[in-house]
Amino acid sequence: MNRSDILQDVTITCPAEIKNMKQLQVGVFFSSRMLTLVMTGVSGKNAPHSLINWVCIPLPDDLAPDSDPWVKILEQSLSRFTAHAKKVDVWCAIEPSMLKIKHIVIPDMPMEKVSNAAFWGLKRETDFDETTDIFDFEVLEDEVVDGVKKKNLIVFSAGKNRIQSLKKIFDRAGYPLCGITAIPFALQNFVRTRKVDLEVPYFAVVHISQDTSEIYCFSRAGVLLVRSLRTGALNLMEGLDENPEMAQLFLPGEVPEVPPSVSPQVQEVSERLVSKIIRTGDYCAQHYTGNTPITHYYFLGEIDMFAPFMDLAQRMVPGGVRLFEPLTRDMPAALPALPEKKDEHSAVLIAWGLALSGRDRTPNFIHTHQDKQKQIRRKRITTTVCLAGGMILAALVAMNLFFFTVHKKDLALLGQLDRELTRVGKDITPVDIDEIVDASKKKINHADVYIDRYRPLGVIYDLCRITPPHIRLTSLAYGKTGAQKEEVRTIRIQGQITGPGLTLEAELAHYILSLSASPVFGNIQVTKERTQVKNAQDQLLFSATLEAF
């Protein structure tokens, strides 16, 4: 196939409905033979994602996905397929061989500790290496085992190099990826968006490609088990050289109305493959469904339309088998039916599942649980900073209003003073102001002189008023101590108290307290005291110093 003629031979149209759609998403699924694009969108508020368009583009042989011609084909295909829409989320999937996935059960614990338990659970079950792999997990549901609450987790990882390689390919094409997931999670999207009718709580999807087969066991919550088999469509073709009509059934093309009989070689390989599928379902039932058997098997892939193989599986699998066919009731009327060719049909279904992806319902190796936690922490920090900034701004506004009010009052007072000055101060000169100040100082000095002149009389009056008859003052001295600016007026008194000997100390204490209560005296200290008996009466002789205010 000439690489320059690839897109010329493919009709890529964009339906008119795209103009009225929101949340446009494109699922990109590619193999060595074909590039498949599927677009979904939402027609209105609370409306489900519906299928808008699909296209399958054959690729030339030996065309590496990271080569410039391949990237050019991807760029042109997406550009024509999306009609240059400005906002389109693009999702793709890693190869099944790149996925490491396990189902584990851990004790019930807070969500902040689940990540660490999931990490070590995957490391214990697989050869996971945190330096080369991207780790993520998903909590499926809680369950009670023997009265103990536990958590069901699906833990998985993929190589960092492959994730970065896919991101670079789409970046070079001008369509950065919104998410990178895996095929089982793409099929899981059909369950979570209710695009498939679920008659039972547990079921399995068998995806048969050319070289391998993948068995995905599901519950209504999500993926339970993933098993890869090395038997694919090409293995079933072994021994078909002698039966060209049978071999034709495995090649891309139309299915004959009457298929030929199955050769013994094909019969044997088919039986082995179906037996492995049944054993996988039994293993899942024993370990993950509480011994509830898996009775519904949905087939998808290269040979799901190969009638002899499907008839054999129908006879061997308990409960029979079904084709994996999502509901198409919400498809636009103008959209053609899904392709009938075996390889195109399965590719469109997988790309459709990718186009149903969402950050909240689909594991994403670009935006893992750890990235979500970092985003939450950044959001909390941003919210805290915004709140703190808002509080600071509010405080600044309040302070500004306060100072504005104070300033306004000061201006009003200043205006009032100016008006008073204008009214009464027309004949006032600086000389008049100096004379008024001098007169005020003289009045203050006269008051000080008056106080100094009559202070002794106030001291004597308060001493006479406070001293009781049985206390006799024998000496009174008045003087000043200290520097001129800090001089202290001191009174020294001596006296005697006459009365019963046991009450003399109490009488002295009461007398000192009475002097302290006077506004004239302060800082009273008794410097000396002694008792004596005179004329058959007990006496207490004392000396004290007082500060006069």
Image (cartoon, rainbow, N blue to C red):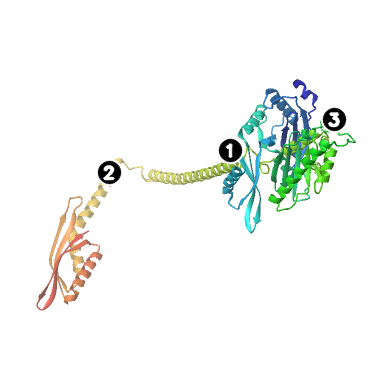
Distance (Cα) linking label 2 and label 3: 135 Å
Disc 2 residue type? Asp
Residue 434 is marked as 2
Distance (Cα) linking label 1 and label 2: 94 Å
| Numbered label tally | 3
Residue 242 is marked as 3
Disc 1 residue type? Asp
Disc 3 residue type? Glu
Circle 1/circle 2 CB separation < 8 Å = no
Q: Residues within 10 Å of mark 3 (few under 14, many from 20)?
A: few
> Circle 1 sits on which residue?
129
Residue 301 vs 169, above or below: the answer is below
Q: Residues within 10 Å of mark 2 (few under 14, many from 20)?
A: few
Front residue of this view, candidates 250 and 260: 260
Where is residue 295 shown, x and y percent of the image? 78, 49
**Do we see residue 416 in this rendering?**
yes
Residue 526 vs 403, above or below: the answer is below
Q: Residue at x 25, y 46 (%)?
A: 438
Q: Which quarter shows the C terminus?
A: bottom left
Distance (Cα) linking label 1 and label 3: 47 Å
